Amino acid sequence: MNDRQPVAALPYAGVRVIEMTHMVMGPTCGMLLADLGAEVIKIEPIAGDSTRALRGSGAGFFGMFNRNKKSVAVDVKDPRGLEIVRRLVATADVFSENFKSGTMDRLGLGYPQLDALNPRLVYVSHKGFLPGPYEHRTALDEVVQMMGGLAYMTGPEGRPLRAGASVNDIMGGMFGAIGAMAALAQRERTGRGQQVQSSLFENNVFLVAQHMMQFAVTGQAASPMPSRISAWAVYDVFSVKDDEQIFLAVVSDTQWALFCDAFGLAALKDDPRLATNNLRVQAREWLLPELRSRLAPYSAAEIGAIFESTGLPYAPITKPQDLFDDPHLLATGGLEAVTLPADASSAGRPIDTRTALLPLTLAGERLRLRSAPPALGQDTCALLGELGYTPDDARALIDAGVVAGRYGADVAAHGDGPGGAPSANEVASA
């Protein structure tokens, strides 16, 4: 990438993360830490993370959640492969995994085993459920949306509907990263790492907790979003000229006056039945049809321009693919060019596209893309060199199917052992 941020300037520069994750939740945790400057080494099976080959709604998983990482492909069921991972863990600050409970222990990579190897290690587990009666269950984002009330709140009455993004997976990974950050901060005081756990189900409960509290406060169950009683009278999608749609919101008495003035609705502005927001909410049954009729002759662009000029909230109804050309994202650097590797592309070749950056700034700067999602095993040989393996060792391991990677110039560039290998920081900024 051009104009890369120097890794040393980022807050988690010098932190090494070993990641054994797949799908969305675990990779999101690693992506967040990587974007913040950590060196994230993704341990993949010889055949690669399964999301490299996903199609349909999973086709974007690998390309979205694995940027700024390195890839090491290794068979951890082979003692020689397991030894490679253990050597890497001995150099690490964070280990992140999202396999079913018991899997890592059987591999010899559970928390007690790695804590004995590296007592400063922060061990992050991403699970379906925190320890308890449900922890044995297999969870997916959609599973916990159904059992955690989110699907009920999203769909119409009697038609539970999952949210249109992997909200629990992504937020579960975010909470895993937050937990890792907290544990690293505590390690500064104690000198020891600890285990951190994040989960899909408890994350989903956190998302719907406002509706739980609504019931506690009012004694009335929250209605699903399509049939809810809105807190505001004008807070809906409107169909307008040429069958276009636009979302409009008028959420205060001041905004109501501005709205009526902008569209010449003096009679509605002066109607005592509509004098306050609460009165307008009670009048929604007849008010909204009236407003829909008044706004129908306008195009969505005309309404949007009026709302923008008066400072009223509105939104076009946008499809995800339209965001590649969003003028705000393009102007503010919210999207960055990236080339996805051929082994994570349904086209079977590298794809040039743009990717969404983290939605935050540090000192006014976005956290930039430093490297594209890695090809399978592209960093295997370099990291073997850092760990003390010779080029001949790497060739033998590749030929035996213990690791996958590219030997030759990649290995030679990193020398024959620790003396010729770069430091972790040098690797991170390479």
Image (cartoon, helix red, strand yellow):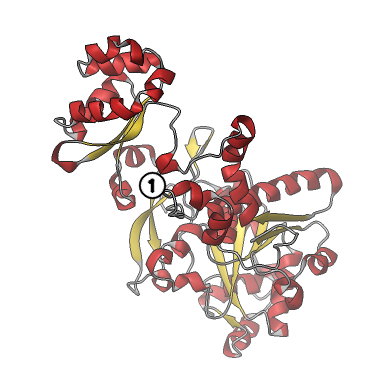
Q: Residue at position x 19%, y 36% from top?
A: 240
Quadrant of image for the N terminus: bottom left
Q: Nearer the viewer, residue 305 or 116?
A: 305
Question: Within 10 Å of the Cα at label 1, are there few (<14), some (14-19), or many (20+) other Cα atoms?
Answer: many
Q: Is residue 271 above or below residue 192?
A: above
On screen, residue 235 versus residue 167, left or right, reads left
Q: Residue at position x 73%, y 84% from top?
A: 79
Look at the image and tell me whether residue 109 can be seen: yes
Residue 23 placement (x, y as % from top left): 53, 65
Quadrant of image for the C terminus: bottom right
Q: Is residue 142 above or below residue 286?
A: below
Residue 190 placement (x, y as % from top left): 85, 46
Identity of the residue furthest to the bottom in this view: 400
Q: Nearer the viewer, residue 15 or 301?
A: 301
Residue 44 placement (x, y as % from top left): 58, 73
Q: Quadrant of residue 42?
A: bottom right
On screen, residue 190 versus residue 314, left or right, reads right
On screen, residue 44 versus residue 87, left or right, reads left
* Amino acid at dot 1: Leu
* SS under mark 1: strand
Look at the image and tell me whether residue 357 can be seen: no
Q: Which residue matches tag 1?
A: 335
Q: Number of callouts in the render?
A: 1
Residue 272 placement (x, y as % from top left): 34, 10
Q: Nearer the viewer, residue 8 or 363?
A: 363
Q: Nearer the viewer, residue 148 or 353?
A: 148
